[in-house]
Amino acid sequence: NAGVTQTPKFRILKIGQSMTLQCTQDMNHNYMYWYRQDPGMGLKLIYYSVGAGITDKGEVPNGYNVSRSTTEDFPLRLELAAPSQTSVYFCASSYSMNPRDRDTGELFFGEGSRLTVL
Amino acid sequence: AQTVTQSQPEMSVQEAETVTLSCTYDTSESNYYLFWYKQPPSRQMILVIRQEAYKQQNATENRFSVNFQKAAKSFSLKISDSQLGDTAMYFCAFVRYNFNKFYFGSGTKLNVKP
């Protein structure tokens, strides 16, 4: 099992450029998330999805867009990159939030993507 | 809104000793999960331990155990027999039942010294 796979692992962008961070999971999880982690800080939720075709904003959605056309894929789009978007980005997925399910609540993370905007 | 607070930005412990990391949270919910995640220098986030709020018994996973005080909204992590491989950032996290948003603390950097 590959789990959650993110690409690229590293990227340098110029101000104003756009890019897409790819995320795919092979665990058939309904729930997928994008977080950003600034140096010395915790994780901030950017966007999340509860299933194919459904997405919603998290705490810090400005400057980002997502789509969820399949259960497996949840790409994060950065439009008009700004230095404030320099961060490490994590994609995560989970199976269920139903207390009756065995693995409920556990997040599975990708390895992260370090993005620098200069 | 839920908040998670980790008041210890950095801690050190000697190899083989025991260390406790603190976490407090604020919620009006009764049913929720609490987690401790570990982030080693490789950046991969790894689940350490999970606690369900309705369970009074504290969760344990080998050398890792929690002290869950629901009334005090406290959820500390105890690491026994610390190993060099335990060196990492540790994050406390909260999520409500049947809800989708996880709330993370700011993390505690743990250094295990030989």
Image (cartoon, rainbow, N blue to C red):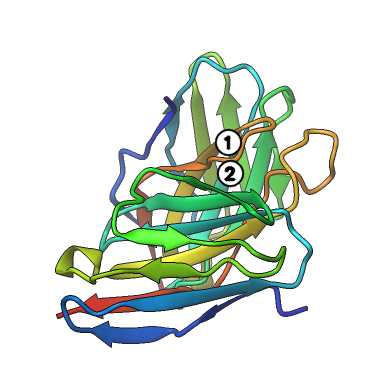
Residue A99: which quarter of the image?
top right
> Measuring 46% from the left and 73% from the top, which residue is drawn there?
A112
Task: Mark 1 and mark 2 in contact? Answer it, CB < 8 Å.
Answer: yes
Q: Position of residue B49 (x, y in %)?
A: 64, 49
Q: Nearer the viewer, residue A48 or B8?
A: A48
In the picture shown, does residue A34 fall above or below A115?
A: above
Give the residue type at disc 1. Val
Q: Position of residue B41 (x, y in %)?
A: 41, 75
User: Mark 1 or mark 2: which comes first in sequence?
Assistant: 2
Query: In the rendered picture of this protein, how many numbered marks are placed on residues?
Result: 2
Q: Is residue B28 visible?
A: yes
Q: Which residue is mark 1?
A: B95
Q: Position of residue B10 (x, y in %)?
A: 29, 53
Give the residue type at disc 2. Phe
Front position among marks 1 and 2? 1
Binning the other alpha carbons within 10 Å of mark 1 as few (below 14), some (14 to 19) or many (20 upward) gives: many
Residue A80: which quarter of the image?
bottom left
Q: Secondary structure at mark 1?
A: strand
| A16 relative to B28 in the view: left or right | left
> Measuring 74% from the left and 25% from the top, which residue is drawn there?
B55
The Cα–Cα distance between marks 1 and 2, rounded to whole angstroms, is: 9 Å
Q: Secondary structure at mark 2?
A: strand
Q: Nearer the viewer, residue B32 or A5?
A: A5
Residue B35: mark in rendering = 2
